[in-house]
Amino acid sequence: MSTHPFAGIYAALLTPLTPDGRLNAPTAQKLLLELTSQGLDGAYVAGTTGEGMRLSMETRKELVETVMEILPAGKRIFVHVGTPDVRDAIKLAEHAAAKGAHAISSLPPALDSQQVMAFYKELAQHSPLPLLVYYFPKAAPLAFQKPQELLEICDLPNVLGVKFTDFNMYLLNSLAKRGKLVFNGYDEALAAGLLMGAQGGIGTTYNLLGPVYLDIYRAVQQGDWETARTLQYDANAVLDILFRYPFFPAVREAVKHMGIDCGPMASGEAFTSEAQRKAFIEDMDVNLPKGILHRIQWPVASR
């Protein structure tokens, strides 16, 4: 495994909001401290999971200030600064640097490949912090029409590596072999990504299953692939449950059930009914794999 100083397991942090849509700073701090106390290496803030693109510039800055204020020593923060206008992304990068963040990241704008290259080149050139490219073809299908384009962007000065949210393990391995820091982005494929050269993971369900993914990472470091595979199967069984419902509302509800209420989503997405919400909790109660119950804080008295 790589010894890159930023290697490790990071939660794609949920952004807690109040009922009227403002940042719930105390809850954001509580969530971050809970995750880092579990052993996670830090967090990736204001990304897809954190709905950064739906938040105002000021709220995004406030979120960074909130997490940096209480970040434990030795932990790290990646700040997603993606915006349609690279000038705004640079402003967010400068703010992140001023507040002590460790790196920035950005989804590409909805542009063609040539414009995406120009966006990343300008952002990397003007950012005071190293840049983690966010490769997520499902969210930005126009950005990288050819694998070579991603490889070229990763060779730009000040590009740290890639948050790789795709199932193309051949391409992931190609990036890893070039010496770039690669984070696996799909939670359901962490073990596979680590096998192919990823040096860690960044994921949504790390907010509720952080110790499970951390144990997968540690098992791989020790060469214990049987344990890594078993734990990945268990994590995927939880993902199977989450995918049966509106995914992000289900993740937030699960975290709430474990003691941290992150409030509504900025998008307004929610369960379709109270009955659906209750069905989700019951589904989790009944079908959570027994092999991970001792690793997480799911309150199921009957088990």
Image (cartoon, rainbow, N blue to C red):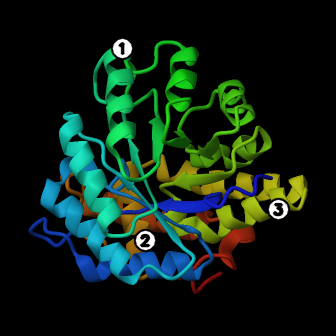
Q: In 3D space, how far apart are the residues under numbered discs 1 and 3 (Cα atoms)?
A: 40 Å
Q: Is residue 185 above or below residue 64?
A: above
Quadrant in which residue 288 is drawn: bottom right
Q: Which residue is mark 1?
A: 114
Residue 224 on image: x %, y %: 90, 58
Residue 252 on image: x %, y %: 37, 64
Say which of marks 1 and 2 sits in front.
1
Helix, strand or loop status at disc 3 = helix
Q: Residue furthest bottom?
A: 301
Residue at position x 88%, y 62% in the image:
222
Q: Do we see residue 272 in this rendering? A: no
Residue at position x 27%, y 72% in the image:
65
Q: Which residue is mark 3?
A: 219
Residue 38 on image: x %, y %: 60, 79
Q: Do we see residue 276 in this rendering? A: yes
Say which of marks 2 and 3 sits in front.
3
Quadrant in which residue 114 is drawn: top left
Say which of marks 1 and 3 sits in front.
1
